[in-house]
Image (tube, rainbow, N blue to C red):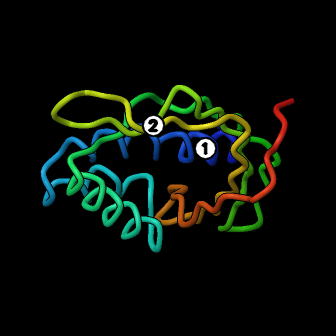
Amino acid sequence: MTAEEAVIAAYKGIYFAGRRAEHTPDGQRKPILAPYVTEPLLSRMLRGIVALRATGRFTWGMPVLHPFDVKIRGQKATLHDCQDDRKTGQMDEKTSQRLLHGVEKTHLVATLLLVDGAWKVSTVEQVRQPCSVG
């Protein structure tokens, strides 16, 4: 696996790990996320899950990821993602009613750090302007 492929795999991994962590009791979430995420994103994700679950909601669906413009400089990498979130959102835990839906062309920029030989996502920020895929 090339360094670029490893960066993209780590980025994609946060979405699957986040979903698993969301349906796991509080004390067991950090070990699920830690292989993919480092600070400050790790604490942000853990707080976000607690806040979401406190409202009786959880997320549904999985975004369609379109990572591009991967740049690696030493032990730091950045990538852009033009996500299609239309088949994702938040759902009421009791009624299973889908309350929120995502949108397409969500432009995100992720920063990853090489920690103990593994790429981990440290920040993910949304860019105001939508992106275009391809």
Classify 10 Å Cα crowding around label 1: few (below 14), some (14-19), many (20 and above). Answer: some
Q: Decide which of 98, 67 is in the foreground and name it.
A: 98
Q: Residues within 10 Å of mark 2 (few under 14, many from 20)?
A: some
Residue type (three-letter) at the residue carrying disc 1 = Ala
- Residue 41: x and y in percent read 46, 66
Q: Residue at x 46, y 47 (%)?
A: 14
**What residue appears at the point 27 percent right and 44 percent down from the top-left corner?**
57
**Residue found 56% across the figure and 37% down from its top:** 102
Instruction: Evaluate if marks 1 and 2 touch, with contact meaning CB atoms under 8 Å apart.
Output: no
Of badges 1 and 2, the one in the foreground is 2
Residue placed under numbered mark 2 in the picture: 89
x then y, percent, for residue 79: 72, 52
Q: In the figure, 34 relative to 82: above or below?
A: below
Q: Earlier in the sequence, mark 1 or mark 2?
A: 1
Kind of residue indicated by mark 2:
Gly
- Percent x, y of residue 39: 45, 72
Nearest to the observer: residue 39 or residue 54: 54
Q: Position of residue 125 (x, y in %)?
A: 63, 62
Residue 34 placement: quadrant = bottom left
Quadrant including the N terminus: top right
Per the rendering, the mark at residue 6 is 1
Which quarter of the figure has residue 131? Answer: top right
